[in-house]
């Protein structure tokens, strides 16, 4: 299929590389030129090599020309990052004023619930204003990629969540994702807002598990229980499993903090008191002080103490330090007068 991917950041490049790897013809659009000859501005295992091989094979073209990106595309994937500061309304307006033929738009933006429908409304309004007779379908397709494991997650997904409102969009998505479902049907079709909320609810569940384990760990310390044994006892329950059951210094990164905050704000706007998620966020905030308290308890006055921090990124196999608990701890140690050596 002829697919255009719009965006300059992490998610857009992963989408372009993986869809090209599956044999699609990809046009990667960004407002600023994309040059991978000197490497990538972030670290993701295997991504640079996949981009280079597909560009060399002619399956991947980079462009800054919106007309080129939209000229022959069957599918347009919106994967702009928050750093690019591009609003969904502006994107939709540009698309509606540029396209000359029907295209299925796939919304993979981190956005408010209802944004996919708004993009659809704006695009079709602009198309109609130009006197064109076709209508555009917009699909909500949230992604569940983990930094450091993005290619593995993309190529072997647990599920592919697709919020669609029409037969044409459903058929196009079935064709696009067919190579990812050869052994098992991973496509999950649902309503557009169902798909948007599923993304945030997934993050909320993972964040809740992390905060719960940190809270149980705090209790374990006071009653003399071995938290590792507690974790094993919990995770062996088939209803629970072991993922995200490790206590520590709290969750970080872009995704979990942003998604939890988005759900809390959405609830407030709708008059729903998000009691549980507010507590999850508060436990994570307090967890930022936990490591410092442990060090202070063991070492006493930290002034002049030499502390080594092993790990700066918020998770392994990435160089992303967004909301990293390590950074929080380092700032606390420096404020306490400690001498810090950091390694990653």
Image: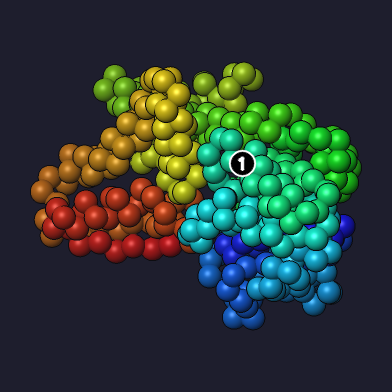
Query: Residue 168's quadrant in the figure?
Result: top right
**In the image, is 19 to the left or to the right of 241?**
right
Occupied quadrant, residue 1: bottom right
| Residue found at x 36% / y 25% | 279
Residue at 38% x, 39% y is 250
**Is residue 155 positioned above or below 66 on the image?**
above
Q: In this view, does 327 lie to the left or right of 305?
A: right
Q: Position of residue 25 (x, y in %)?
A: 83, 64
Q: Which residue is most to the bottom?
A: 37
Let me know if residue 184 appears in the view.
no
**Which residue was labeled with disc 1?**
118
Q: What element carries label 1?
A: helix
Identity of the residue drawn at 17% across and 43% down:
296
Nearer-the-camera pick, 219 or 332: 332
- What residue appears at the point 55 percent right and 25 percent down from the top-left corner? 235
Q: Position of residue 314 (x, y in %)?
A: 44, 51
Q: Is residue 255 visible?
A: yes
């Amino acid at each position: 299929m002829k697919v255009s991917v719009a965006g300059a950041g992490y998610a857009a490049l992963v989408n372009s590389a993986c869809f090209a790897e599956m044999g699609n013809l990809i046009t990667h659009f960004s407002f600023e030129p994309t040059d991978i000859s000197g490497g990538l501005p972030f670290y993701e295992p295997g991504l640079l090599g996949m981009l280079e091989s597909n560009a060399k094979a002619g399956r991947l073209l980079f462009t800054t020309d919106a007309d080129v990106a939209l000229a022959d595309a069957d599918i347009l994937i919106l994967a702009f990052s928050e750093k690019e500061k591009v609003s969904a309304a502006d994107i939709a307006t540009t698309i509606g004023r540029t396209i000359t033929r029907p295209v299925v738009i796939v919304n993979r933006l981190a956005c408010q619930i209802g944004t996919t429908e708004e993009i659809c409304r704006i695009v079709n309004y602009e198309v109609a204003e130009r006197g064109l007779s076709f209508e555009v379908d917009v699909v909500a397709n949230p992604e569940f990629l983990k930094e450091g494991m993005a290619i593995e997650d993309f190529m072997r997904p647990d599920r592919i969540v697709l919020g669609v409102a029409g037969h044409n969009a459903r058929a196009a998505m079935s064709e696009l994702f067919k190579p990812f479902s050869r052994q098992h049907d991973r496509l999950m079709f649902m309503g557009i807002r169902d798909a948007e909320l599923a993304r945030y609810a997934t993050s909320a569940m993972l964040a809740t598990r992390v905060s719960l384990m940190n809270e149980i760990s705090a209790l374990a310390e006071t009653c003399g229980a071995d938290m590792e044994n507690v974790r094993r006892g919990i995770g062996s329950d088939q209803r629970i499993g072991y993922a995200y059951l490790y206590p520590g210094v709290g969750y970080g990164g872009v995704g979990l903090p942003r998604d939890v905050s988005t759900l809390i704000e959405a609830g407030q706007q709708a008059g729903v008191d998000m009691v549980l998620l507010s507590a999850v966020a508060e436990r994570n905030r307090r967890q930022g002080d936990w490591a410092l308290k442990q060090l202070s308890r063991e070492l006493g006055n930290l002034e002049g103490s030499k502390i080594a921090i092993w790990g700066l990124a918020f998770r392994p196999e990435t160089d992303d330090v967004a909301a990293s608990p390590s950074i929080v701890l380092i700032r606390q140690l420096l404020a306490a007068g400690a001498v810090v050596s950091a390694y990653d």
